[in-house]
Amino acid sequence: IRAGGERGKRIFIEDIAKAAGADFVAVFDPYSIDEAIDAIVKGLKIAVNGGVAVLISRRMCSLLASRLGLLKGTYTIDVDRCIGCLLCIKSLACPAILNEGGKPYIAEFICRGCGVCARICPVKAVVKKN
């Protein structure tokens, strides 16, 4: 969008990186954990060997996705399954996951339903709420 509000030409940063001679360019969805790890590992291998790696994480803002109805439901923690490792708190900067007495708790009114916490929980204690 231009300053006057009209649509302009969309320029992709990955095209600029390629044109500038980057040895490796990857665009990935940061919510796709395996895809993100794969891109980061490949980029690091290039960079360690003196190359230039450009990593671009791209995803619609979860607040906007929620407002558009693209994210449905929230997550909760199955307290019987949770081992209290707090990986969900230590690994994410999610404002919906709180620490209550050494156990994680998801504030459902803040949760946007992205599901990243469920994907990283080692014991699958984070579950989608019906």
Image (cartoon, rainbow, N blue to C red):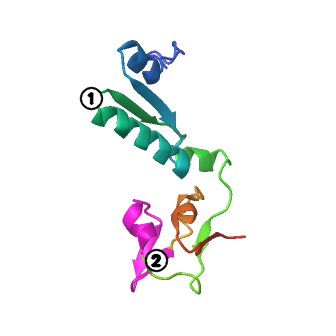
Relative side of 38 to 21, left or right: right
Placement of 97 over or under 23, stated as above or below:
below
Q: Residues within 10 Å of mark 2 (few under 14, many from 20)?
A: many
Q: Which residue is mark 2?
A: 104
Image spot of residue 16 (x, y percent): 40, 17
Quarter the C terminus occupies:
bottom right
Q: Secondary structure at mark 1?
A: loop
Placement of 89 over or under 33, stated as above or below:
below
* In the foreground, 21 or 60: 21
Residue type marked 2? Pro
Marks 2 and 1: which is nearer the front? 1
* In the foreground, 81 or 89: 81
Q: Is residue 90 magenta?
A: yes
Image spot of residue 59 (x, y percent): 53, 40
Q: Say which residue appears at 60% left-offset and 59% top-offset.
A: 113
Instruction: Kindly indicate the quadrant of the structure image that contains residue 100.
Output: bottom left
Residue range of the region highlighted in magenta in the rendering = 86-105
* In the foreground, 73 or 118: 118
Q: Which residue is mark 1?
A: 50
Placement of 10 over or under 39, stated as above or below:
above
Q: Secondary structure at mark 2?
A: strand
Report how far apart the C-alphas of labels 2 and 1 lie in the structure. 41 Å
Relative side of 129 to 80, left or right: right
Q: Say which residue appears at 58% left-offset and 59% top-offset.
A: 115
The numbered mark, 2 or 1, whose residue comes first in the sequence reads: 1
Placement of 80 over or under 118, stated as above or below:
below
